Amino acid sequence: MRATTNQAPGLNVITEYIIGYIYLGYPVANILFKVYGHVSMKQAIFFVQDFKLDHYMKIPPRAMFVAQVLGTIIAALVQLGTAWWLIDTIPNICDRELLPESRPWTCPGDHVFYDASVIWGLIGPRRIFGDLGYYSAINWLFLAGAIGPLSFSCTLSFPR
């Protein structure tokens, strides 16, 4: 779908929603499923975009694959090394109250995953959108969202 329309479905909330129903009360399971479902899809799309670019630039696919793998390994090692260095060098790096004013370091990315794991993993979609919540009628909009494009495409395929 991304190759033909340049639009990709976001699996971020969908993965959290699905695993929240399956494993209610397990926020760590929610985080892992989100990483495996959403983040791996995003990385795969970036990988395919690079291959499309190298196809247009007439770079051999094997050379591009090797460059991608080496770049991924180097980036992962540099990021891991930098994170270890920062955690060892700056005490209380993620605690805003314990940091002095001269150190602006915080960990905002951790809060996004933490908040999502609490909302979708600990509280769960059943308590929000299911029979235990106030917003159960919103689930019918998923069905409307699936049927809407199909009915529109069927009207376009038949000539008048």
Image (spheres, helix red, strand yellow):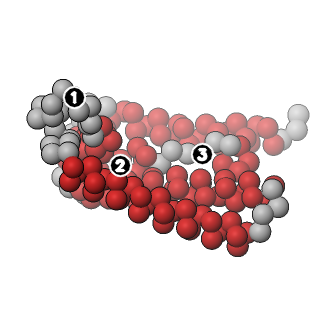
Q: Which residue is mark 2?
A: 16
Q: Quick one: label 2, few (<14), some, or many (20+) residues within 10 Å?
A: many
Query: Pointers 1 and 2 in contact (CB under 8 A)?
Result: no
Q: CA distance from mark 3 to mark 1?
A: 42 Å
Q: Position of residue 85 (x, y in %)?
A: 28, 54
Q: Position of residue 54 (x, y in %)?
A: 75, 58
Disc 2 marks a residue whose amino acid type is: Glu
Query: Pointers 3 and 1 in contact (CB under 8 A)?
Result: no
Q: Nearer the viewer, residue 30 or 139?
A: 30
Disc 3 marks a residue whose amino acid type is: Ala
Q: Position of residue 86 (x, y in %)?
A: 27, 49
Q: From this viewpoint, which residue is outermost toward the right?
A: 160
For this view, does 96 lie left or right of residue 158? Answer: left
**Residue 102, numbered circle:** 1
Residue drawn at the location 78% of the way across and 63% of the way down: 59
Nearer the observer: mark 3 or 1; the answer is 1
Q: Nearer the viewer, residue 129 or 115?
A: 115
Q: Which residue is mark 3?
A: 8
